[in-house]
Image (cartoon, grey):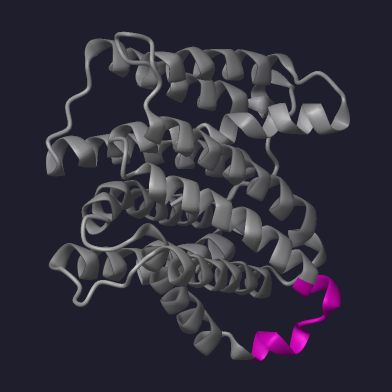
Amino acid sequence: MTNLKQIQADLALLGVTFVWGITFVVVQDALEGIGPYYFLGIRFTLAFAFLAFIYWRRFTLLNRDTLKAGLLIGVVLFAGYAFQTVGLQYTTASNAGFITGLAVVLVPLISALLSKKLPGIAAILGISSATIGLALLSLNNDFKVNYGDILTFFCALSYAGHILLVGKYAPRHDPVLLAILQIGVVAAVSIICAVTLETLPEQFTRPVWLGLFITAIPATALAFLIQNKVQRFTSPTHTAIIFIMEPVFAAATGWLWAGEILTTRQWIGCLLILTGMLVAELKDSLGTSGTEEVKGTG
């Protein structure tokens, strides 16, 4: 691995993270003119069609085991996007961005529960810091939790499960085909939920078109492609640290675009969440375990 290739890979992943970060506000605006499931269904259908068109030859590698893996990972990924998108109707883009980022911290905790082994010191410190930060960010003055924050926390849990499943199945199957299958499952389940639970608007507003334009190709299809292409040139630790910037970009966009203002207590909570993510991922320098496979949450 050359330093130049690693720098290029890190910059590409930072660009992906930036796109994911700004989508919180864009999606929040779009949801004023369309139901969350229809939005997800159209977004992922466009992304699936785009990738399937480019990588149609990969379908010759499809077998029963790959199909099962893709279906399982896709259902968990759908849960993450569904909780996130519906949650954005009830919370701010800033809160959603930081809470979603907790997935990076939850991975070592879930891994420890599944393996029945205590997480390393870095994971414990990271989880503790992020949990305190989450409380400061999300709890109201009367110590009641925002409904949207609860949904977004379940989104973070789902993304953590997605990271673990990808880490388990990606080495055994074609990663591009696995990504296409995941996106296809999210599209299919979203459409089913939309037809059952929502009404398609007679016409799309400008924020809806903008949201679909930004999320379908750049934030879904291209983001998955770029990550699969460049992550081999950088380390998992580098990738995880770069992805920590997603909630920072989300908060910055919420402040610049939507005029969202965080209180001093909430800024302290954000700082503790970021610290927890960073500590949990600095496993190489601390000699502890953490996530070995990282997937994006945008």
Q: In this rendering, would 257 be left or right of 89?
A: left
- 10, 36: nearer the viewer: 36
Q: State the residue at coordinates (34%, 44%).
A: 88
Is 60 inside the magenta-drawn segment? yes
Quadrant in which residue 34 is drawn = bottom left
Vertical side of 203 occupied by 11: above or below: above
The magenta segment is 57-67
Using the rendered image of the protein, determine whether residue 1 is visible from the camera's viewpoint.
no
Task: Name the image quarter holding the N terminus.
Answer: bottom right
Using the rendered image of the protein, determine whether residue 93 is visible from the camera's viewpoint.
yes
Percent coordinates x, y for residue 153 in the rendering: 50, 33
Q: State the residue at coordinates (44%, 67%).
A: 194
Percent coordinates x, y for residue 79 in the rendering: 57, 52
Q: In this rendering, would 137 be left or right of 108?
A: left
Q: In this rendering, would 96 be left or right of 294?
A: left
Is 155 inside the magenta-drawn segment? no
- 181, 186: nearer the viewer: 186
Q: State the residue at coordinates (74%, 60%).
A: 170
